[in-house]
Image (cartoon, rainbow, N blue to C red):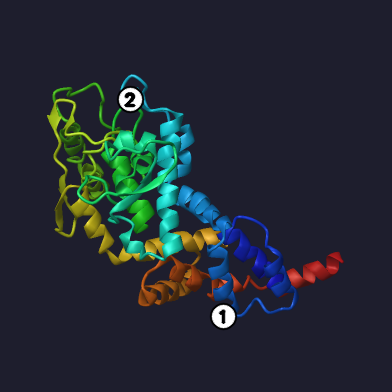
């Protein structure tokens, strides 16, 4: 019904109940119309309430809502505190919100040359001085920062308390950006021994780990992506060395494409068609509040084709989702359901 559609639309974009305009459209049975839905989405995305999409969807998808609970090892990272955690989380929220508000193409997420910083996060990154706690848009051209993968929030939530984790970072990229979640490790397979091989670098220890055939199939995909981010420590700070070891940020994808550093790796992922498909799938799941079922794949294919043709912007993606039958319809009741309901009455 139009009332159900008003509720679904409002909780998708605002995480809140419908306003008077949506309810009046529902009351007159004029909401479930493609042009009306598009115009309402534009109106709602221009509202301050739309920040909920950045906070809630991006917070879930990118894991940034875990920032208030992360606890980096204080002796190793004495500069990390609640203010920095908030600043790094807020950076990603504002960055993502810019993509929504400006309808930027989704494939620019990983290499756009700007971010949002306050004094605390700018000092942490070693970038231009900001004199107060207000967040300002900062041009990152010519710096080691640029794109989502260089955000301290993502780099922190995919690390261990005292060190980075190329495995977790690589898994995050595969799962959240390419919708290719690796299989869980086989029973009995142990992680690397933190105490052993103190004279070997983390990369050397992980390379020895994935030399085991049972580990190689997943780690050969995950680890190189994670290694590309090794110049960023466990709270997202830039470093030239990992302790006493030089950092090797090069790697290869299984298909033979090679990269040296996070910028080249991010560019390759940006060019991967799976990125647009995966982002569409993640937002589709959030919009409908359920996982993807077999019957949803035909709708997802149309959504991806539609918004890609229209320019790959986030607003185009949202429009394709809210006008798809998967969003505007609900599962019909079976005869058995109807019969049971009538008997109950």
Left or right of 57? Residue 273 is: left
User: Picture coordinates of residue 32 (x, y %)?
Assistant: 64, 77
Residue at 13% in and 23% down: 199
16 w.r.t. 307: above or below: above
User: Picture coordinates of residue 302 (x, y %)?
Assistant: 43, 76
Left or right of 133? Residue 124 is: left
Q: Residues within 10 Å of mark 2 (few under 14, many from 20)?
A: some
Name the mark on residue 84: none
24 w.r.t. 114: above or below: below
Left or right of 111? Residue 120 is: right
Secondary structure beneath dot 1 equals: helix
Q: Nearer the viewer, residue 97 or 316?
A: 97
| Mark 1 lies on residue | 35
Please identify the quadrant where the N terminus is shown.
bottom right
Q: Residue furthest right?
A: 345
User: Picture coordinates of residue 244 (x, y %)?
Assistant: 14, 25
Residue at 17% in and 24% down: 197
For marks 2 and 1, give the CA distance: 52 Å
Name the mark on residue 77: 2
Secondary structure beneath dot 2 equals: loop
Q: Earlier in the sequence, mark 2 or mark 1?
A: 1
Q: Nearer the viewer, residue 120 or 336?
A: 120
Asked whether the residues under the numbered discs 2 and 1 touch, taking CB atoms below 8 Å apart as contact, a structural biologist would say no
In the picture, residue 111 is in which quadrant?
A: bottom left
Q: Residues within 10 Å of mark 1 (few under 14, many from 20)?
A: few
Residue at 35% in and 55% down: 177
Q: Nearer the viewer, residue 111 or 246?
A: 111
Residue at 76% in and 72% down: 338
User: Picture coordinates of residue 178 (x, y %)?
Assistant: 34, 58
């Amino acid at each position: 019904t139009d009332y159900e559609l008003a509720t679904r639309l409002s909780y998708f974009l605002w995480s809140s109940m419908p306003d008077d305009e949506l309810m009046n459209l529902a009351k007159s049975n004029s909401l479930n119309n493609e042009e009306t839905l598009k115009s309402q989405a534009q109106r709602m995305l221009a509202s301050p309430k739309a920040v909920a999409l950045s906070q809630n969807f991006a917070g879930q998808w990118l894991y940034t809502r875990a920032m208030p609970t992360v606890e980096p090892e204080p002796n190793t990272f004495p500069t990390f505190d609640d203010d920095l955690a908030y600043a790094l989380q807020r950076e990603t929220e504002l960055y993502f919100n810019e993509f929504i508000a400006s309808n930027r193409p989704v494939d620019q997420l990983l290499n756009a040359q700007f971010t949002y910083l306050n004094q605390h996060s700018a000092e942490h990154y070693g970038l231009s001085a900001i004199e107060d706690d207000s967040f300002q848009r900062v041009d990152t051209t010519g710096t080691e920062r640029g794109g989502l993968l260089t955000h301290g929030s993502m780099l922190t939530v995919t690390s261990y308390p005292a060190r980075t984790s190329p495995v977790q970072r690589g898994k995050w990229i595969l799962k959240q950006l390419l919708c290719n979640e690796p299989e869980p490790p086989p029973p009995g397979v142990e992680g690397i021994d933190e105490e052993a091989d103190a004279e070997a670098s983390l990369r050397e220890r992980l390379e020895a780990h994935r030399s085991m055939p049972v580990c190689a199939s997943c780690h050969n995909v995950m680890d190189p992506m994670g290694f590309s981010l090794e110049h960023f420590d466990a709270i997202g700070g830039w470093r030239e060395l990992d302790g006493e070891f030089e950092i090797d940020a090069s790697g290869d994808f299984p298909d033979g494409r090679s990269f040296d550093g996070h910028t080249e790796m991010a560019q390759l992922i940006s060019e991967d068609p799976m990125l647009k498909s995966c982002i569409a799938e993640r937002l589709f799941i959030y919009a409908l509040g359920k996982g993807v079922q077999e019957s949803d794949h035909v709708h997802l294919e149309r959504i991806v084709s539609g918004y890609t043709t229209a320019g790959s912007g986030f607003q185009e993606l949202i429009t394709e989702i809210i006008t798809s039958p998967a969003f505007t319809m609900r599962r019909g009741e079976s005869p058995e359901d109807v019969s049971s309901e009538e008997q109950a009455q």
